Amino acid sequence: MKNFTSLLLLGCILLSSCQENKSKEKKENTIKKKEWISLFDGKTLNGWHQYNGSAIGEAWSVVDSTLVFDPSKKRNGGDKNIVTDQEFTNFVLSIEWKVAEVGNSGLFWAVQEGQEYGQPYLTGPEIQILDNEHHPDALANPKYHQAGALYDMVQPTADVCNPAGEWNHFLLTIDHNINKGIVVLNGTEIVRFPVHGPEWEALIAASKFGDKNSPFYTHAPKFGQFKTGKIGLQDHGDKVAFRNIKIKEL
């Protein structure tokens, strides 16, 4: 009986130790998962590639620790959007940007690549980057194309965008676990939206991506249908710069 009790006690100790180690390992993995990961090292274009391609053209370069798109350096025409090598699902993305006067660009997520998709915006929703003061899109539809808008779907509740040539900061949260997307521009929350389900589908249906009279309707049948995909930066033909790009997975 004494030996049985000792064995039983030893078993309990080992089980407790095993559970404690698993709990510790789970906690460490959770902490590690929530660390910020840099998507731009300030020196190279490592971690990015041209959409539906590989090497990045001359239009994108690193200047003074800044990722710059300069349309004057485009070669052979065509769009030169870039996307991350990695894919993400639930995350918080922090990115600083500035655009030239009358400039237009965009930030995508859940982007898919493939010959059936000619542009990032055919699959990935976009957070608008814009010179609100001078670009006519700032007054279109009526504010669904302003800086920080969920492009053509949710308009900002406030215009807190800094002028062209000055740095702005986006904090974009995409969390399918709680069905929530949030855009914070320069410290102010300006957009909130669902990221899947009936309400998300209703937003798509009310946009040009769901309008049967829009050319986007036939070319983007899978727009907004993917939870996992790449982060993308847009070539809209205007000079734009980015820095301090980092992401934290949720």
Image (cartoon, rainbow, N blue to C red):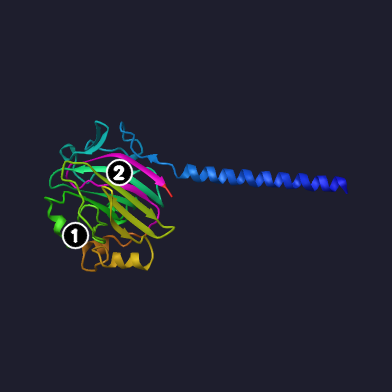
Picture quadrant where residue 81 is located: top left
Q: In the rendering, at what x and y percent does residue 28 appear?
A: 53, 42
Residue type at numbered disc 2 = Ile
* Residue 208 drawn above or below residue 7: below
**Magenta-colored stretch includes residue 239:** yes
Q: Is residue 46 visible in this depiction of the protein? A: yes
Residue type at numbered disc 1 = Lys
Disc on the earlier residue, 2 or 1: 2
Question: Along the line of sight, which residue is nearer the eye, 23 or 119?
Answer: 23
Look at mark 2 in the image and give the residue it sits on: 95
Q: Identify the residue shown where x is 40% and y is 60%.
A: 179
Q: Is residue 114 visible in this depiction of the protein? A: no
* Residue 214 drawn above or below residue 231: below
| SS state under label 2 | strand
**CA separation in Å, label 2 and label 1:** 22 Å
Q: Identify the residue shown where x is 28% and y is 67%.
A: 205
Q: In the rendering, at what x and y percent does residue 113 appear?
A: 34, 50
**Magenta-colored stretch includes residue 49:** no
Q: Which residues are magenta?
A: 226-248
Residue 143's disc is 1
- Image marks 2 and 1: residues in contact by CB distance under 8 Å: no
Q: How many marks?
A: 2
The answer to whether residue 245 is left or right of residue 34 is left
Q: Residues within 10 Å of mark 2 (few under 14, many from 20)?
A: some
| SS state under label 1 | loop
Q: Identify the residue shown where x is 50% and y is 46%.
A: 30
* Residue 169 drawn above or below residue 191: above
Instruction: Pick out the residue farthest to the right.
Output: 1
Q: In the rendering, at what x and y percent does residue 45 appear?
A: 31, 35
Q: In the rendering, at what x and y percent does residue 175 appear?
A: 40, 55
